[in-house]
Image (cartoon, rainbow, N blue to C red):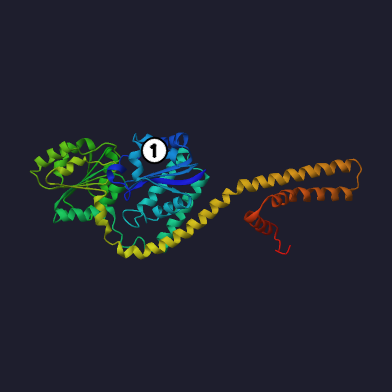
């Protein structure tokens, strides 16, 4: 078994591909169990966010897991492969450390990914797919991420996705204080956006969610009103700015619904930010006049602001990460020799028991203790030296020089000896 990380992210795959391999939160535990049972993985954890889908596995090789991923999402493997990266051993370790530290995010240094990784670990633990190797990996991952965030300025001048959405809206509308804002969903991403937009004091705020209770909880915090998703067709036209991010596997806003809203609005501009993966808004909506639709990938251009101020911190973070990778790889390598050490000890124990049994029998026959001890020590010496001396007599050429060096190191012999 070996450590692997494979997947795709905003750098390797467009949104249209990422949304096809996104995992639903409600089905995550079943997916993890299925991956272990049918995907050739001994241990597994899945990180599925708006910007990435990654599988961390302890497996003999990743091909079975990649086949499982394609089959699970009912996609031909050849359609996924151009976008996938496969990272073995230390590359997987380094990737995990960089992701948790915010170095691989669309928003450099953003802290949200760390919470998402911790959630992925909790889901794997609940599914029973988190074994000793992955537990150690993520334990060390979170420790390195903490060091990066406390010892560098990686989060300085951070432009979040929420702040970027506000900036985009301000390009369309002279003043957000004159607009009515609708949030669809009530998860963490929507909460972040709601706080940023509420700070601009919009004319009215509405929160729409599948469950009214959760919508009301968020609405109270930002002085807004709450509705259910079923009320969207009637309420949509009353809003100028829409920010949506749900876990729905199907679009929430279809082209027909938006067209009807535009007619009621007499074609006043409608600004929509879709932060969901899979997308909440049908792609055809972007073709409508008077609609400004931005996806997760579109916002990437805005969040580049402030990047230069954090580039120096990236180098410092990479030093911390490389040190952590070195330590973890050393730990993995030490674990790999454990079976050999155990086999070596078992072999020595069998030899010891054999010579001890012979000694006990000789003592029972009346042999002197001195003679028995001499025979036992001689027998043990011969058994312990038999394997290395036999091997020395069998090796030739360059292999002999290498083997001689190993023997000298094992038994602390001088070259003269």
- Residue 269: x, y in percent? 12, 48
Which residue lies under the disc numbered 1?
69
Which residue is at 18% across, 40% downward? 284
Is 180 rendered above or below residue 232?
Answer: below
Density class for disc 1 (Cα within 10 Å; few <14, some 14-19, many ≥20) is many
* Residue toward you, 328 or 187: 328
- Residue 411: x, y in percent? 70, 58
Observer able to see residue 315 = yes
Residue 230 lies left or right of residue 344; in this view the side is left
Is 106 rendered above or below residue 66?
Answer: below
* Residue toward you, 235 or 410: 410
Is 273 rendered above or below residue 157?
Answer: above
* Residue toward you, 349 or 391: 391
Q: What is the count of numbered marks?
A: 1
Which residue is at 40% across, 55% downward? 98
Q: Based on the displayed image, in which of its 4 quarters is residue 417 positioned?
A: bottom right
Which residue is at 80% across, 44% downward? 356
Residue lying farthest left? 266
- Residue 106: x, y in percent? 31, 53
- Residue 402: x, y in percent? 63, 56
């Amino acid at each position: 078994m070996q450590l692997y990380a494979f997947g795709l992210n905003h750098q390797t795959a467009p949104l249209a591909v990422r949304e096809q391999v996104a995992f639903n939160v409600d089905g995550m535990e079943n997916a993890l169990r299925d991956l272990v049972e049918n995907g050739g993985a001994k241990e597994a954890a899945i990180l599925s966010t708006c910007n990435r889908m990654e599988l961390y596995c302890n497996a003999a090789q990743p091909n079975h897991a990649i086949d499982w991923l394609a089959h699970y999402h009912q996609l031909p493997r050849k359609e996924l492969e151009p976008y996938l990266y496969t990272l073995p051993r230390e590359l997987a370790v380094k990737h995990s450390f960089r992701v948790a530290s915010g170095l691989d995010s669309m928003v450099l240094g953003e802290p949200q990914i760390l919470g998402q990784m911790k959630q992925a670990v909790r889901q794997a633990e609940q599914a029973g797919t988190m074994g000793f190797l992955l537990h150690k990996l993520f334990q060390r991952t979170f420790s390195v991420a903490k060091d990066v965030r406390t010892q560098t300025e990686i989060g300085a001048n951070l432009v979040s996705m929420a702040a970027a959405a506000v900036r985009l809206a301000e390009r369309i509308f002279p003043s957000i204080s004159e607009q009515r804002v609708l949030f669809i969903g009530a998860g963490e991403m929507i909460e972040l956006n709601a706080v940023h937009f509420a700070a601009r004091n919009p004319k009215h705020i509405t929160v729409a969610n599948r469950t009214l209770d959760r919508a009301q909880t968020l609405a109270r915090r930002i002085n807004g009103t709450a509705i259910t998703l079923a009320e969207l067709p009637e309420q949509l036209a009353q809003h100028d700015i829409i920010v949506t991010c749900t876990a729905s596997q199907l679009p929430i806003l279809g082209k027909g619904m938006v067209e009807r809203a535009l007619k009621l609005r007499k074609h006043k501009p409608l600004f929509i930010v879709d932060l969901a993966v899979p997308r909440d808004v049908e792609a055809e909506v972007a073709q409508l006049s008077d609609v400004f639709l931005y996806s997760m990938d579109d916002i990437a251009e805005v969040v580049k602001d402030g990047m230069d101020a954090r580039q120096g911190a990236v180098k410092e973070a990479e030093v911390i990460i490389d040190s952590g990778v070195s330590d973890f790889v050393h730990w993995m390598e030490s674990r790999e020799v454990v079976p050999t050490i155990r086999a070596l000890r078992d072999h020595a124990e069998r030899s010891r028991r054999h010579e001890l049994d012979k000694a006990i029998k000789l003592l029972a026959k009346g042999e002197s203790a001195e003679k028995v001890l001499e025979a036992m020590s001689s027998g043990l010496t011969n058994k312990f030296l038999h394997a290395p001396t036999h091997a020395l007599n069998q090796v030739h050429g360059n292999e002999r020089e290498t083997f001689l060096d190993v023997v000298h190191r094992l038994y602390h012999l001088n070259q003269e000896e």
